[in-house]
């Protein structure tokens, strides 16, 4: 059997709403994945550094403050600089539909908005992580 | 056979015959019915469920101990609750316009939302502020912004609530300074600072300093306001965000009251007399989906706090025992799907708050699961309160559900569940220790995860999410914050730093820094720095140097 999928759940920026981040972290863990949670107030630099150090397959970022258009693309830029674009990056939170195409262009594979069942997110990760 | 025995016999007979005949053919929708807090909801309630009920001891009369029925003797017959919509976004100029609009629409108090950099004590030009300026509230960097925010709003005529915690003392100082420029003395000011750091560690996340210096700043504001700003609510001890983070109703009041106990103890330890500061403590609760559980929650919280203040802290002023509270409807229960349905959710939640005796109320707007609310959406939310107030009759008599077997039984149940938690927290060494150990956070997370699983298993129905769903178009016309607000704020700071007397700024900051290392009350020194136009980031910066920063314990 292959190794479990490793996931970093991250809270970029100053947003303190971490209910969603913690629920999805736990759901991934219950689905057999290995989960690292960064805690609050992470800079894009810290997130990318942790992801590389921990050798994760997936970065899941949660943001409810409206700063996603600034912070998510920055994470993608840094991953590119570090030659780590093989990491699957997904996002969630209060993110208006009209912002989603831009975030996907930047390389975020999927955005999960409020009301998404955790099972959908888990299925998405399983389908997209080649292990 | 006495009355009780007779009733017991007839209930048993009813269950075994009348009910059993039906349920054998048509089972009930659920087995058992359970509240979010975990108690079982019975088929029907009778006097048997409030055994030992003592009207005077359990309820009293409105405006009298233990305040179960409400803190005022006439409640909404005298005056409706304060309709107070939480608002603020982008710049001080834009937020000022929104406040004037809301006041013109009949809102009766202001409630200021600050952006995250302001809440965490960073100026708009700080590297960590990038992308966050003006997003979840208004950006305030100095007194100059605060002057614009309240321009044309007479501060002796409105009451203003400010959702500000770690830097609450600084924003209060700015408010006092703006009032002074309007010719309004501090003793004429009405309003609230949230100033509740413990729930920031637990659930909301905008902490700066570690618990000890944070508690000191809080007791400094208690002491200062008791002398200088006597009508100011110096803290709003908040369960709202604890509930939003996923707690149950019983956990919400338990953890909020545990925080309240910690503040009272800290103030008494700092040498204050309980009756000098306790009358200005206020609370802030969530109003969630379960109509009756919420009403019971508010009533139980009032009774529990009154008893704690009287018995545990020996307060003698009745005002010290009154739990006065603001309510906001549950943001986390809004759905992004079929957003108009949120108007109905909010109506029911608002009704619970009114039937539970709130002193002020914020009703959420239908579009808030998607973005900050538009002006139209906010107006409907405000109208919802006005319809409840003026048309429904819900405020025409006080505590209308008192004496309901169900309401009294679950009021007792909620109080008991909260007391059990308070005992556990006392055993751990109080709220601060329980937070540092991650106990409270873990309890909340367990509840949040259970809630999510119930939705996914279909045990909990959310209309438009897991039942009665439909294909929808993307919502249009959401509020967008101008991305240039960050640059505009940076420019304002640059201009300010050229214009102000930088030597005076330096000397007031130095004085604050020195005092921070002593036991002195910091409020007067913060006020001096604010009046010299030191920025929020500069003031919090010197305090960071002395106090250090909080390191959260991470639990999942």
Image: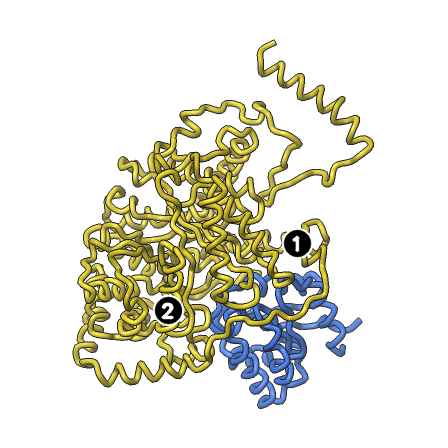
Chain colours: A blue, B yellow
Outermost residue on the top side: it is B1
Position of B193 relative to A43 (above/below) = above
Local crowd size for mark 1, using a 10 Å CA cut-off: few (<14), some (14–19), many (≥20): some
Residue B440: give x, y in percent of width and height. 50, 52
Q: Classify mark 1: helix, strand or loop.
A: loop
Q: In this view, does B376 lie to the left or right of B526?
A: right
Instruction: Let me know if residue B437 appears in the view.
Output: no
Instruction: Let me know if residue B69 appears in the view.
Output: yes
Please tell me which of labels 1 and 2 falls first in the chain: 2
Given the image, what chain letter belongs to the residue carrying mark 2? B
- Which quadrant is the N terminus of chain B positioned in? top right
Residue B355: give x, y in percent of width and height. 48, 40
Position of B503 relative to B347 (above/below) = below
Residue B296: give x, y in percent of width and height. 51, 38
Q: Which of A87 and B425 is in front in this view?
A: A87
Outermost residue on the right side: it is B25
Residue B387: give x, y in percent of width and height. 48, 48
Residue drawn at (20%, 65%), measured in percent from left and top?
Answer: B182
Local crowd size for mark 2, using a 10 Å CA cut-off: few (<14), some (14–19), many (≥20): some
| Of labels 1 and 2, the one closer to you | 2
Q: Nearer the viewer, residue B94 or B15?
A: B94
Residue drawn at (38%, 38%), measured in percent from left and top?
Answer: B77
Q: Quadrant of residue B5?
A: top right
Q: Which mark is residue B454?
A: none
Q: Name the residue under label 1.
A: B462
Q: In which quarter of the image is residue B362?
A: bottom left
Q: In this view, does B384 lie to the left or right of A1?
A: left
Q: Classify mark 2: helix, strand or loop.
A: helix
Q: Name the residue under label 2.
A: B97
Position of A100 relative to B381 (above/below) = below
- Which quadrant is the C terminus of chain B positioned in? bottom right
């Amino acid at each position: 059997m292959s190794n479990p999928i490793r996931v970093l759940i991250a809270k970029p920026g100053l947003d303190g709403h971490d209910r969603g981040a913690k629920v999805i972290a736990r759901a991934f863990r219950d689905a057999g994945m290995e989960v690292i949670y960064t805690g609050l107030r992470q800079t894009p630099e810290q997130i990318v550094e942790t992801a590389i150090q921990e050798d994760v397959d997936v970065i899941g970022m949660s943001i409810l403050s409206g700063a996603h258009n600034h912070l998510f693309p920055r994470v993608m830029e840094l991953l590119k600089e570090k030659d780590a674009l093989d990491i699957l990056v997904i996002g969630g939170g209060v993110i208006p539909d009209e912002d989603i195409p831009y975030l996907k262009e930047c390389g975020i594979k999927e955005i999960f908005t409020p009301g998404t069942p955790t099972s959908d997110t888990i299925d998405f990760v399983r389908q997209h992580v080649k292990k | 056979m006495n009355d009780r025995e007779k009733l017991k016999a007839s209930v048993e007979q009813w269950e075994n015959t009348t009910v059993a005949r039906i349920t054998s053919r048509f089972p009930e929708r659920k087995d058992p019915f359970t509240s979010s807090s975990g108690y079982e909801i019975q088929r029907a309630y009778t006097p048997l469920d409030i055994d030992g009920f003592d009207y005077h001891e359990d309820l009293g009369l409105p405006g009298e101990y233990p305040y179960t029925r409400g803190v005022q003797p006439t409640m909404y017959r005298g005056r409706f609750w304060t309709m107070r919509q939480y608002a603020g976004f982008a710049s001080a100029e834009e937020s000022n316009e929104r406040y004037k609009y809301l006041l013109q629409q009949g809102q009766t108090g202001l409630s200021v939302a600050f952006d995250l950099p302001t809440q965490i004590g960073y100026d708009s030009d700080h590297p960590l502020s990038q992308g966050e300026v003006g997003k979840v509230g208004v950006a305030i960097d100095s007194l100059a912004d605060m002057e614009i925010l309240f321009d044309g709003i007479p501060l002796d005529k409105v009451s203003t609530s400010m959702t500000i915690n770690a830097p609450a003392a600084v924003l209060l100082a700015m408010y006092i300074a703006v009032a002074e420029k309007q010719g309004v003395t501090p003793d004429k000011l009405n309003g609230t600072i949230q100033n509740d750091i413990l729930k920031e560690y637990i659930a909301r996340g905008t902490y700066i300093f570690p618990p000890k210096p944070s508690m000191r700043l809080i007791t400094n504001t208690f002491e200062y306001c008791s002398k200088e700003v006597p009508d100011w609510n110096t803290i709003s001890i908040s369960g709202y965000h604890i509930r939003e983070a996923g707690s149950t109703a019983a956990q919400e009041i338990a953890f909020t009251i545990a925080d309240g106990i910690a503040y009272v103890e800290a103030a008494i330890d700092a040498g204050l007399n309980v009756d000098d500061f306790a009358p200005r403590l206020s609370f802030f609760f969530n109003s969630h989906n379960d109509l009756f559980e919420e009403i019971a929650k508010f009533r139980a919280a009032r009774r529990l706090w009154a008893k704690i203040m009287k018995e545990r802290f020996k307060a003698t002023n009745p005002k010290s025992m009154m739990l006065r509270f603001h309510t906001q409807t549950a943001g986390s229960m809004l759905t992004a799907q079929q957003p108009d349905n949120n108007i109905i959710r909010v109506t029911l939640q608002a009704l619970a708050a009114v039937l539970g005796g709130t002193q002020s109320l914020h009703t959420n707007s239908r579009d808030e699961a998607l973005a900050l609310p538009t002006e139209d959406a906010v107006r409907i939310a405000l109208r919802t309160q006005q319809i409840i107030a003026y048309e429904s009759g819900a405020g025409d008599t006080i505590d209308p559900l008192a004496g309901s077997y169900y309401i009294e039984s679950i009021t007792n149940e909620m109080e008991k569940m909260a007391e059990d938690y308070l005992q556990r927290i006392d055993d751990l060494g109080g709220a601060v220790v329980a937070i540092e150990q991650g106990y409270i956070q873990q309890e909340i997370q367990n509840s949040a995860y259970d809630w999510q699983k119930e939705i996914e298993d279909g045990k909990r129905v959310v209309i438009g999410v897991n039942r009665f769903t439909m294909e929808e178009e993307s919502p249009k016309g959401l509020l967008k914050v101008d991305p240039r607000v960050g640059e505009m704020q940076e420019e304002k700071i640059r201009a300010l730093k050229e214009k102000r007397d930088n030597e005076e700024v330096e000397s007031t900051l130095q004085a604050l820094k020195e005092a921070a290392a002593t036991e002195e009350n910091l409020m007067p020194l913060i006020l001096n720095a604010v009046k010299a136009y030191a920025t929020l980031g500069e003031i919090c910066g010197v305090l960071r140097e002395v106090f250090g920063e909080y390191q959260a314990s991470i639990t999942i």
